[in-house]
């Protein structure tokens, strides 16, 4: 079959340009990306073979191999995993499907200057294309397991790539980089050096559970055995004191498709009748698709070191969907399906335990490292609050780690505990007002009386806020009350005469109130004198049990 030339999709072209001209200092990571893809491909093949025994694929010696040819200045990363069909190569390598990358490009355009762009590379995994940071030409040869025809993909990264069929291609994928000329000034970055490759693999890919092999150069005559460069032990199965934080972080980057460090690493070992090991990570940044329906959950399920599935939603509740990591269970069937997991009693217990562990980690973080907690809450607070509605069992734990903007301080949020400690004598309720922005809320006429009397009000701006405040109802015996709802008599406590006085005033103004009520009859239920206002002449309040406009919209959107 002849060679066909294709153009890269626009986004892919932009990304490639960036890679080719990159002065990003940490180019070593290109190898991590290629090894990470090879490892995924091996996981996928083992799984597919497990599901379909008839699949015509060799799974006897699954591994990754790295070859360096100093003379030809090439570096090849080869795996005997799942491979790709002709069509898949075009789809997966010629376009950018990864939504994180699309987001990356968008931010890139906003960054404009080169320095900003370089900074961004460090924050997003750019995957396969990272090879173009160090190579002026990349060739990929692949054959999908079970298929007979192979495919060759080649590109110099400049707008086009070619595809052709390749006869005799082995099962799996090999990616060959034709390395750019070595920088004579900087021998440390010579990727045709065996030593360099060894060092990068050890640093970035040691945790990969598949063997990563390299044939030492002295064996060009064919004498030496390939050497395994990584330790191949699953990180989560190794004792804590034998694993460095960096090693944990590299695992996070691999499974989280994130180039940044995680905020927190959480380990859990459960022994007894249902054994499992968990290694969970809290990312430092929320993904952009956190609130879209198809947002993925990042916990992988393994059974006795065998990868079973990505995004295993049965392992954590939806409000912890941002947590990444690995759970390795000893006593599950390798054929376990998502449906079975949803009903499994042991998985249910595991989910409860993992949930509690994440929440207790947050509590510790809050006590020991305020800054880190603040980062966490800024990124994920809005998601966690969904748990206040859906997870009654952990409601108290969630209320403990939740914090809210408040009139007490312009920028620093408060916990409910702190709010209660500051409550004034005679104040019985916790007051809040929700709205779209802090500024909008602060300018609301509802705030006037509270501001004048120095009563603290929580300022809630997340969509979920009204729902949880209603669902939770109270904290430590103090009612959560929206100051936009019902009748709030702020003076009742400090002015004995207030009731009598109010009645007198109501009589006095009866004519006016009656007339207003008549005029506005279609739109309102009642007109009352109020102690809420000091500057504005009037404000609209809902009944204590009415839905607020924002809530009405939300329920309508949910089809209720
Ligand atoms: P990501 O790994 O985040 O999906 P990449 O750019 O690294 O993004 O890879 C894009 C896709 O190309 C992968 O999702 C995978 O489907 C395919 N791919 C890349 N390398 C390999 C490989 N060695 N074997 C099989 N498929 C691969
Ligand atoms: Mg990848």
Image: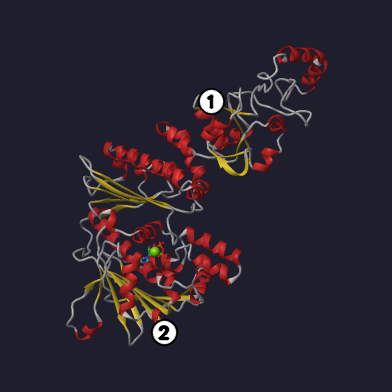
Residue 537: x and y, percent?
Answer: 79, 29
Q: Quadrant of residue 362?
A: top left
Q: Nearer the viewer, residue 442 or 137?
A: 442
Q: Earlier in the sequence, mark 1 or mark 2?
A: 2
Side (left or right) of 281 relative to 160? left
- Tags 1 and 2 in contact by the CB under 8 Å rule? no
Q: How many marks?
A: 2
Residue 551: x and y, percent?
Answer: 59, 33
Ligand 1 in which quarter: bottom left
Q: Quadrant of residue 539?
A: top right
Q: Is residue 86 visible?
A: no
Q: Is residue 316 visible?
A: yes
Q: Residue at x 54, y 35 (%)?
A: 418
| Location of the N terminus (image quadrant) | bottom left
Q: Quadrant of residue 152?
A: bottom left
Side (left or right) of 383 relative to 230? right
Residue 182's disc number: 2
Report, in whole angstroms, how far the alpha carbon at label 1 lies from the one at label 2. 69 Å
Residue 281: x and y, percent?
Answer: 39, 51
Q: Nearer the viewer, residue 178 or 339?
A: 178
- Residue at mark 1: 478
Residue 58: x and y, percent?
Answer: 21, 65
Q: Residue at x 53, y 47 (%)?
A: 378
């Amino acid at each position: 079959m002849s060679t066909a030339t294709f153009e890269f999709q626009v986004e892919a072209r932009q990304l490639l340009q960036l890679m080719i001209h990159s002065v990003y200092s940490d180019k070593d990571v290109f190898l991590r990306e290629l090894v990470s893809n090879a490892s995924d491909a091996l996981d996928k093949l083992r799984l597919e073979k497990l599901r379909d025994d008839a699949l015509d694929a060799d799974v006897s010696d699954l591994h990754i191999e790295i070859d360096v040819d100093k003379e030809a200045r090439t570096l090849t990363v080869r795996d005997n995993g799942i491979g790709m069909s002709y069509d898949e190569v075009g789809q997966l390598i010629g376009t950018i499907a990864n939504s994180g990358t699309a987001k990356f490009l968008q931010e890139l355009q906003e960054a404009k200057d080169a320095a900003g762009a370089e900074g961004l590379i460090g924050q997003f995994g750019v995957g396969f294309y990272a090879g173009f940071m160090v190579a002026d030409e990349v060739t990929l040869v692949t054959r999908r397991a079970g298929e007979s025809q192979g495919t060759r993909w080649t590109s110099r990264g400049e707008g086009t790539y070619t595809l052709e069929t390749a006869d005799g291609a082995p099962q799996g994928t090999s990616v060959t980089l034709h390395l750019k000329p070595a920088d004579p000034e900087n021998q440390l970055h010579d990727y045709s050096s065996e030593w360099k490759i060894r060092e990068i693999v050890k640093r970035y890919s040691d945790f990969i559970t598949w063997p990563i092999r390299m044939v030492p150069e002295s064996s060009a005559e064919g004498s030496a055995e390939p050497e395994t460069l990584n330790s191949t032990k699953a990180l989560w199965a190794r004792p804590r004191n034998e694993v460095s934080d960096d090693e944990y972080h590299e695992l996070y980057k691999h499974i989280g498709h994130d180039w940044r460090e995680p905020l927190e690493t959480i380990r859990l070992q459960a022994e007894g009748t249902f054994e499992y090991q968990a290694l969970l990570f809290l990312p430092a940044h929320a993904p952009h698709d956190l609130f879209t329906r198809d947002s993925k959950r990042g916990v992988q399920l393994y059974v006795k070191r065998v990868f079973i599935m990505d995004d295993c939603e049965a392992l954590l509740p939806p409000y912890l969907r941002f947590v990444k990591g690995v759970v390795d269970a000893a006593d599950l069937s390798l054929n376990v399906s998502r449906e079975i997991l949803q009903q499994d009693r042991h998985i249910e217990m595991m989910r409860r335990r993992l949930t509690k562990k994440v929440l207790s980690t947050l509590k510790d973080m809050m006590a020991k490292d305020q800054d880190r907690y603040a980062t966490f809450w800024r990124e994920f607070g809005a998601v966690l609050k969904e748990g206040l509605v859906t997870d009654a069992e952990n409601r108290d734990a969630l209320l403990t780690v939740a914090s809210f903007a408040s009139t007490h301080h312009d920028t620093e949020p408060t916990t409910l505990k702190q709010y209660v400690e500051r409550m004034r004598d005679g104040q019985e309720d916790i007051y809040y007002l929700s709205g779209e922005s802090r500024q909008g809320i602060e300018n609301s006429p509802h705030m006037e009386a509270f501001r004048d009397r120095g009563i603290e009000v929580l300022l809630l701006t997340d969509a979920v806020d009204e729902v949880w405040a209603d669902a939770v109802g109270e904290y430590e015996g103090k009612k959560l009350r929206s100051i936009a709802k019902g009748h709030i008599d702020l003076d009742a406590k400090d002015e004995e005469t207030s009731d009598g006085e109010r009645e007198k005033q109501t009589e006095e103004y009866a004519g006016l109130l009656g007339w207003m009520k008549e005029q506005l009859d279609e739109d309102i239920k009642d007109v009352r004198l109020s102690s809420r206002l000091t500057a504005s002449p009037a404000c609209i309040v809902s009944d204590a049990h009415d839905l607020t406009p924002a809530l009405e919209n939300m329920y309508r959107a949910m089809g209720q």
